[in-house]
Amino acid sequence: MELRDIMTRNVEVISGDASVKEAANKMRTIDVGFIPVCDGNRLKGILTDRDITIRATADGHDPTKTKVADVMSTDVAYCLEDQKVDEAVCLMEARQIRRLPVLNLDKQLVGIVSLGDIAVHAGDRDMTGETLEEISQPAAPKR
């Protein structure tokens, strides 16, 4: 099964020029902890609630003046829409993440695939449970 068959389409995105406050409000409104940062359909990064907490709030930045681009994660793992679900699962396990942006061959954002999408559509509960266990392992501390 390919990712295009199970991914969530019509994903909400935010511009890197938006303020952290705008992003936080949008994330609250759509009830997500993760939002792709795009320039048009081009993925530039990911903003998570953790990025806001660690890179903006904890560092004392003004959320009305700080830009999303200044605090977003730029080392973004992604998959292509024609990749197999198993490949996404391997990447999720390796990077310890629960969701991945999905790009088309032109590298434009076309969707998001989450562990929940895989659980619902792929029908392999054992694989989903094992993946959740792998991504839930504590990461090695940074030194």
Image (cartoon, helix red, strand yellow):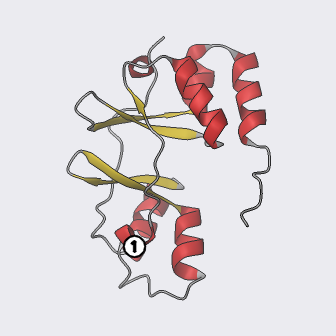
Q: Which residue is depicted at the point 54% across and 66% down?
A: 51
The outermost residue toward the front is 143
Left or right: 130 as drawn, with respect to 6: right
User: Residue 8 versus residue 100: which sits nearer the camera?
Assistant: 100
- From this view, report whether residue 54 is shown above or below residue 116: below
- From this view, report whether residue 113 is shown above or below residue 50: above
Q: Which residue is depicted at the point 71% across and 19% down?
A: 127
Tag count: 1
Q: Amino acid at mark 1?
A: Asp
Residue located beneath label 1 in the image: 70
Q: Which residue is depicted at the point 71% across and 40% down?
A: 135
Looking at the picture, how far across and down is residue 87, in whole percent? 54, 22
Looking at the picture, how far across and down is residue 89, in whole percent? 60, 26
Q: Secondary structure at mark 1?
A: helix
Left or right: 128 as drawn, with respect to 109: right
Looking at the picture, how far across and down is residue 75, in whole percent? 46, 52
